[in-house]
Image: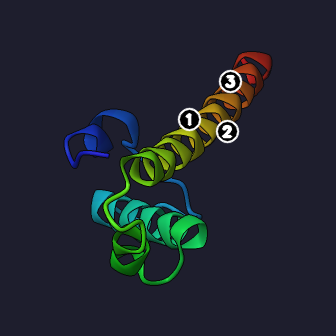
Amino acid sequence: TSGAAVPRYCTVPPDFGFTSADQVREAVRAQTKELTQSILGRDVQQAIASTGGSKADLVCQREVIKRAGKLLDAHWKAAIKSEKKLLAFSD
């Protein structure tokens, strides 16, 4: 998230979780690294090198990461949709 979005959407930040755009940015960076390592192994560079430059293996690795990203996107969209329903219900 950008720091510019904070004043626009979080004029009064919630008293749980969120503290700053920097915290969100760092959490995304850390969790992206964790997910990549969960899929490819702790040594991501070694996992890439272990393909021996095989185009098929590299394409497979890339496709697995892309699909994991799409799955995360689907989870985020579902969470946002649920939040919007809750907000609409509370009005």
User: Looking at the image, which is closer to me, 74 or 2?
Assistant: 74
Q: Which residue is pictured at 40% across the width and 52% down the height?
A: 58
Distance from Cα at disc 2 to Cα at disc 3: 10 Å
Of the two numbered discs 2 and 1 in the rendering, the one whose residue sits closer to the viewer? 1
Q: Position of residue 16 (x, y in %)?
A: 59, 64
* Residue 47 left/right relative to 15: left
Q: Are marks 2 and 3 in contact (CB under 8 Å)?
A: no
Tell me the crowding category of disc 3: few under 14, some 14 to 19, or many 20 or more residues within 10 angstroms, Cα based.
few
Of the two numbered discs 3 and 1 in the rendering, the one whose residue sits closer to the viewer? 1
Counting residues from the start of the chain, the first of labels 3 and 1 encountered is: 1
Q: Amino acid at mark 3?
A: Lys
- The label on residue 83 is none
Q: In the rendered view, would you say 89 is above or below 79?
A: above
Q: Position of residue 66 (x, y in %)?
A: 48, 41
Distance from Cα at disc 2 to Cα at disc 1: 9 Å
Dot 1: what SS?
A: helix
User: Looking at the image, which is closer to me, 52 or 70?
Assistant: 52
- The label on residue 81 is 3
Of the two numbered discs 2 and 3 in the rendering, the one whose residue sits closer to the viewer? 2
Circle 1 residue: 70
User: Looking at the image, which is closer to me, 52 or 69?
Assistant: 52
Circle 2 residue: 75
Q: Which residue is pictured at 30% across the width and 33% down the height?
A: 8
Tell me the crowding category of disc 1: few under 14, some 14 to 19, or many 20 or more residues within 10 angstroms, Cα based.
few
Q: Quadrant of residue 41?
A: bottom right
Q: Amino acid at mark 2?
A: His
